Amino acid sequence: MARPEQEMTMERILKENTSVGRHIEGMDSAISLTAETKSMRLDIANFQSHVTGLEQRVAIMEDHLNTGQDRDQELLYLHSKLVDLEDRSCRNTVCFLGFPKLLE
């Protein structure tokens, strides 16, 4: 049978080990949270970079559209592209339906 002194020592060792175990678990949790925090910070930085890029594009477009002559030219250019796309779409549809001679 264990002496009372030995029982106290064993109890103390178990308490210390439990305390150390909790400390290690706490450290593991802290390390995990740190990794998650770093990942979230990277995600936020990437998102902010994307937003900054979009803001720059919008600013360029606004500058481009603020000049009257350029705006009119841009609208004409976009209109011509739209007409071209509609024309190609019609041609593709006619060819798809098997009526290529209509295009001649």
Image: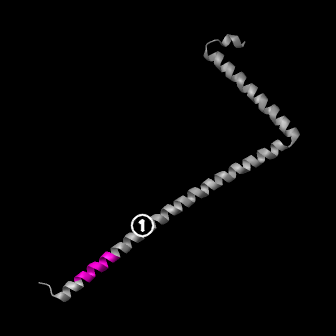
Drawn side of residue 10 relative to residue 57, left or right = left
Q: In this view, does 57 lie above or below 9?
A: above
Quadrant position of the C terminus in the picture: top right
Q: Give the range drawn in magenta.
A: 10-19
Residue 79 position by quadrant = top right
Drawn side of residue 10 relative to residue 32, left or right = left
Q: Which residue is drawn at 41% across and 68% down?
A: 28
Q: Check disc 1: other Cα within 10 Å, few if <14, some if 14-19, many if 20+.
A: few
Q: In this view, does 8 lie above or below 86?
A: below
Q: Which residue is drawn at 70% across and 23% down?
A: 88
The one nearer the camera, 42 or 23, is 23
Amino acid, disc 1: Ser
Drawn side of residue 70 relative to residue 92, left or right = right
The one nearer the camera, 102 or 35, is 35
Residue 75 position by quadrant = top right
Residue 94, x across and y down, in percent = 65, 15
Drawn side of residue 38 relative to residue 10, left or right = right
Residue 5, x across and y down, in percent = 20, 89
Where disc 1 sits, the SS reads helix
Residue 33, x across and y down, in percent = 47, 64
Does the magenta segment cover residue 11? yes
Q: In this view, does 51 lie above or below 32?
A: above
Q: Residue at x 77, y 47 (%)?
A: 60
* Residue linked to disc 1: 29
The one nearer the camera, 88 or 42, is 42
The prevailing secondary structure element of the residues shown in magenta is helix
Q: Which residue lies furthest to the right in this view?
A: 69
Quadrant position of the N terminus in the picture: bottom left
Residue 77, x across and y down, in percent = 80, 32
Does the magenta segment cover residue 48? no
